[in-house]
């Protein structure tokens, strides 16, 4: 399975990195990090993405400016994409078809190819404009799944709550996981 994890410039950028690391290693994993996400990673967690970029077998890191990268083409055959977190700017661009960087271009490809696309908008409260954009995308089959907590799986730490959210996102994308306790 080919999966794209994109991190846009919203608070909680480490959720995207954690989701990437939680993907099965036998998946072909592609990572795109926006310039603003790099700033968020530095400001919130002291992560210098240039020096601390994830690497490993099956992880391909793309520059968000490289609109010609493999994941920008439907013929490359990505199976799923998640934008975690998804900034309101990125959400708006995707909703109106602006594909001016690799994240928005890859998302446009997922929509046109009818592949699984998940956006995790990170904002509170949502404006009427953001809600309209989410509704427009949801009608097209895009999963709109903000990082929302649930308590039935008895999380006792922030890490467990993050695992719950990532597990729910993977469920939507058809990625098997055991990241959280399921309802019994």
Image (tube, rainbow, N blue to C red):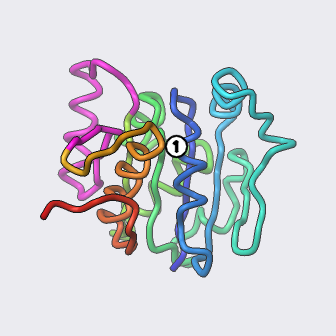
Q: Position of residue 130 (x, y in %)?
A: 29, 27
Image position of 142 with respect to 121: above or below: below
Asked if residue 99 lies left or right of residue 182, the reply is: right
In the rendered picture of this protein, how many numbered marks are placed on residues? 1
Residue name at image x 54 percent, y 62 percent: 22
Question: Does residue 158 lie above or below 168 as drawn?
Answer: above
In this rendered view, identify the residue nearer to me: 31 or 42.
Answer: 42
Vertical arrangement, residue 87 with respect to residue 68, above or below: above
User: Does the magenta-highlighted stretch encompass residue 128?
Assistant: yes
Left or right: residue 153 versus residue 56 is left
- Where is residue 114, by image quadrant? bottom left
State which quarter of the image contains the C terminus.
Answer: bottom left
In the rendered structure, the answer to whether residue 104 lies left or right of residue 128 reads right
Q: Residue at x 47, y 36 (%)?
A: 90
* Residue at the farthest left position: 184
- Rendering coords of residue 35 (x, y %): 69, 33
Residue for badge 1: 15
Residue 124 belongs to magenta span: yes
Magenta stretch?
122-151
Q: Nearer the viewer, residue 44 or 89?
A: 44
Using a 10 Å C-alpha cutoff, classify the residue at mark 1 as few (fewer than 14 neighbours), some (14 to 19) or many (20 or more).
Answer: some
Question: Residue drawn at (41%, 47%), measured in percent from left and top?
Answer: 160
Give how far across and how far down residue 49 sits, in percent: 77, 40
Q: Residue at x 33, y 44 (%)?
A: 155
Residue 151, horizontal then vertical, whole percent: 22, 41
| Farthest-out residue, right | 51
């Amino acid at each position: 399975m080919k999966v794209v994890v994109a991190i846009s410039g919203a608070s909680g950028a480490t959720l995207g990195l954690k989701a990437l690391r939680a993907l099965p290693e036998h998946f072909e994993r592609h990572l795109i990090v926006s310039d603003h996400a790099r700033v968020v990673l530095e400001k919130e967690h002291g992560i210098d993405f240039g020096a601390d970029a994830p690497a490993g077998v099956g992880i391909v890191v793309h520059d968000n400016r490289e609109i010609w990268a493999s994941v920008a083409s439907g013929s490359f055959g990505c199976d799923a994409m998640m934008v975690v977190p998804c900034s309101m700017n990125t959400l708006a661009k995707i909703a109106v078809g602006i594909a001016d960087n690799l994240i928005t271009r890859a998302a446009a490809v997922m929509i046109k190819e009818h592949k699984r696309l998940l956006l995790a908008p990170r904002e509170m409260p949502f404006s009427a404009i953001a809600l309209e954009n989410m509704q427009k995308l949801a009608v097209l089959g895009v999963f709109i799944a903000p990082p929302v907590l649930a308590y039935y799986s008895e999380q006792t730490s922030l890490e467990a709550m993050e695992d719950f959210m990532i597990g729910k996102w993977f469920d939507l994308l058809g990625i098997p996981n055991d990241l959280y306790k399921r309802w019994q």
